[in-house]
Amino acid sequence: MKMIKHTVKSALKISAYMYPEFCAKTHYYIKFKKRLNLTNPINFNEKIQWLKFNELNGDIYTLCADKYKVREYVIAKGCGEILNELYGVYDDPMDIDYRALPNKFALKCNHGAGYNIICDSKASLDIEKTNKQLSKWLKQDFSSHFIEPQYKKIDRKILCEKYIENERGGFPEDYKFYCFNGKPYAVMVCMEREKGTPKFYYFDMNWHPLPFEDTVELINTNSYPKVPEGFTNMKEYAVKLAADFKFVRADFYLLNGKVIFGELTFTPSAGLDVTLQEADAILGSQLKL
């Protein structure tokens, strides 16, 4: 069975270059057990798939999907103050001078998602293993995995950024704003990551809970977290950064009330997010193609 899955995955990756629409439809069917409707997309995941073939090849998407070049866009929008500190940018892992880096830092490749190495202690970092992993990532065409064309033309780099942690020494809360036609509609808050069992709570822009994912637990118990300090500022930044797009998810961290930019995401979970089944119709209704 493992061999069959590997063969199917390899075949889909190869077909992504020659038959991207067929490949997208196949991924969609495997995930949801139903056909992808690109002619008249209704739900959120379907519309994200539609955007792949009708919007995301533009230069502005390449710029903003690039975790390095997006900094130029953030600055151009008058939001440069929320950028995380950048220690270095490299074309090759061998260019990284680890001796010059602080004890804690984050390494990431700029041309996809999940290409992150978080170092909380330089003394315990296996540099050889780290460099091999970075080299492997740099060789990958992330755009072909699930047909995400915004990553295709990115000039691949390695970034080293400041390590972000809260006063408890853990990761700060993560706020992901779902923005439609330039306006934030919902925010997903990722909490309790330090416990190893993260919770995903959804709120509207008035901090009213939305019945998606783990938020149902809050609704059932009538127990909601307080509106965080800095929430209004994050909304304002989301409006500025979303102005040019039919849809974008603007991600931020909030550290002691200070807003820190995360990234701009155009295809959350590559348009294959099974955890959003409850939200698929509602978010889809917000996305006007």
Image: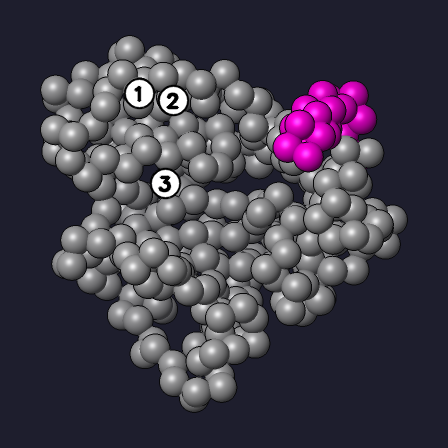
Q: Which mark is residue 75?
A: 3
Residue at image coords 55%, 58%: 179
Residues at marks 3 and 2, CA–CA distance in whole angstroms: 31 Å
Relative to residue 227, is residue 233 depicted above or below? Answer: above
Residues rendered magenta in the picture: 1-21
Q: Is residue 72 visible?
A: no
Q: Which residue is mark 2?
A: 133
Residue 50: x, y in percent? 75, 45
Relative to residue 230, is residue 151 depicted above or below? Answer: above
User: Which numbered disc, 1 or 3, marks the residue that appears first in the sequence?
Assistant: 3
Residues at marks 2 and 1, CA–CA distance in whole angstroms: 6 Å
The mark closer to the camera, 1 or 3, is: 1
Q: Which residue is mark 1?
A: 129
Crowd band around label 2 with a 10 angstrom C-alpha radius: few (<14), some (14–19), many (20+): some
> What amino acid is found at the position of numbered circle 3 in the picture?
Ile
Residue at image coords 30%, 20%: 129
Residue at image coords 68%, 35%: 1
> What amino acid is found at the position of numbered circle 1 in the picture?
Lys
> What amino acid is found at the position of numbered circle 2 in the picture?
Gln
User: Which quarter of the picture shows residue 141?
Assistant: top right
Secondary structure mostly seen in the magenta stretch: helix
Left or right, 6 with respect to 238, comes to right
Tag 2–tag 1 contact (CB < 8 Å): yes
Residue 233: x, y in percent? 34, 63
Crowd band around label 1 with a 10 angstrom C-alpha radius: few (<14), some (14–19), many (20+): few
User: Which numbered disc, 3 or 2, marks the residue that appears first in the sequence?
Assistant: 3
Tag 1–tag 3 contact (CB < 8 Å): no
Residues at marks 1 and 3, CA–CA distance in whole angstroms: 34 Å
